[in-house]
Amino acid sequence: MEKTKIILDCDPGHDDAVAVMLAGKSPAIDLLGITVVAGNQTLEKTVRNALNVTAWLDIDVPVYAGCGQPMIREKMVAGDIHGESGLDGPVFPPLEKKAEPMHAVEFIIRTLMASDGDITMVTTGPMTNLAMAMRMEPRIVEKIRRIVLMGGSYTNGNVTPAAEFNIIADADAAYVCFTSGRPVTMVGLDVTRKVLCYPEIVERMAKVGNKASQLFVDLMAHFCKTQKEIFGWAGGPLHDPVTVACLIDPAVLTTKPMNAQVDIRSTSSYGRTNCDYFGYMGLPATADVAVDIDVEKFWDIVEQGLRNYD
Ligand code: RIB
Ligand code: CA
């Protein structure tokens, strides 16, 4: 099986951590590096969380610290969901792994420039690092095979009625990425809200009985609790791993080409991904927008992802 080369840009974050776990040992993924951005929590905390997860699971992949704030707007975090640490719940041993000295944006630029154009950029947090890399070195744009992002929705948001967190947290960065001209797969709330991590799913993953499954259980104990308290979900929507799952098995996701535009001009709808589902405007498609997910297949991919740590 030919591996898909990816750089995973994330803001761990409980669901980001599961995305890292899926990518970390998958025979289908060549994880070149993990770049971290401020989002669910401050950069110092999201970097620490990425280091803890990769160190604990022996994922021998370098971690790079990136941008600590959005390109233009004021910083926002999601401590209400992910906790003060950004990864409340699991307890890790003393951390020895360090982030690389190179800035994440520099790593993205150098890696893409040295590539044959075969690297997929996977983003599961605000898109600041990727957008800044595009602005610092425009020649990387044509080197990006595809951008697969968790973000947005063609229905409603989760921070405002209009906007989803990863987009509204840096809508300008998302705008830069969506207008880059590169192929985009937008994995929005429309499908991630279909993969709710119910108690029976947690029980299923606990039976895998290894370090990864225990970490999954500990992560979900906090994540599902706060999602229920805030949104009333009976299980936490496991947003970010869907981006990796669809690279492991593309059949898990159904997408529809749409003209998708990030709103950076309005007030009440700032950060909305305006997706022209029916093609009213007759404009060219700018993204492959996820419209459905094979839930059973997704959980099979997650379970196998945990079993890769046996
Ligand atoms: O809206 C959900 C997204 O925002 C997920 O990526 C979650 O980790 C947060 O970053
Ligand atoms: Ca995230």
Image: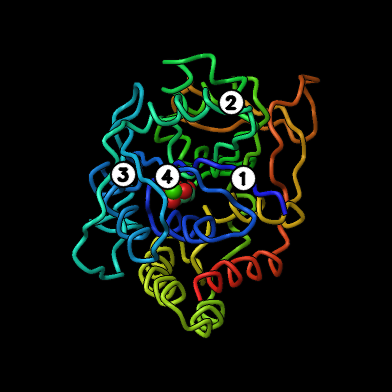
* Closer to viewer: mark 1 or mark 3: 1
Looking at the rendered structure, the secondary structure element under dot 1 is strand
Q: Amino acid at mark 2?
A: Phe
x, y percentage for residue 247? 66, 50
Q: Amino acid at mark 4?
A: Ile
Q: Which residue is mark 1?
A: 187
Compared across the picture, whether 269 is left or right of 279 comes to left
Most foreground residue, 72 or 184: 184
Q: Nearer the viewer, residue 91 or 163?
A: 91
Residue, disc 4: 34
Pair 4/1: label in front: 4
Measure the C-alpha gap from mark 1 to mark 3: 20 Å
Q: Which residue is mark 3?
A: 77
Q: Find out whether the residues at labels 1 and 3 contact each other: C-beta distance under 8 Å.
A: no
Which numbered marker is on residue 178? 2
User: Residue 157 appears at what percent x and percent y?
Assistant: 52, 44
Kindly indicate the quadrant of the structure image that contains residue 212: bottom left
Q: Can you give x and y, in whole percent of width and height, for residue 38 in the image?
A: 32, 40
Q: Please tell me how crowded label 2 is: few (under 14), some (14-19), or many (20+) other residues with Cα within 10 Å.
A: many
- Residue flagged by tag 1: what amino acid is it? Val
In the image, residue 22 lies at what x, y percent?
54, 60
- Nearer-N-terminus badge (4/1): 4
Marks 3 and 4, how far apart at CA: 20 Å
Distance from label 4 to label 2 (Cα)? Answer: 21 Å
Q: Residue at x 60, y 45 (%)?
A: 188
Mark before the other along the chain sequence, 3 or 4: 4
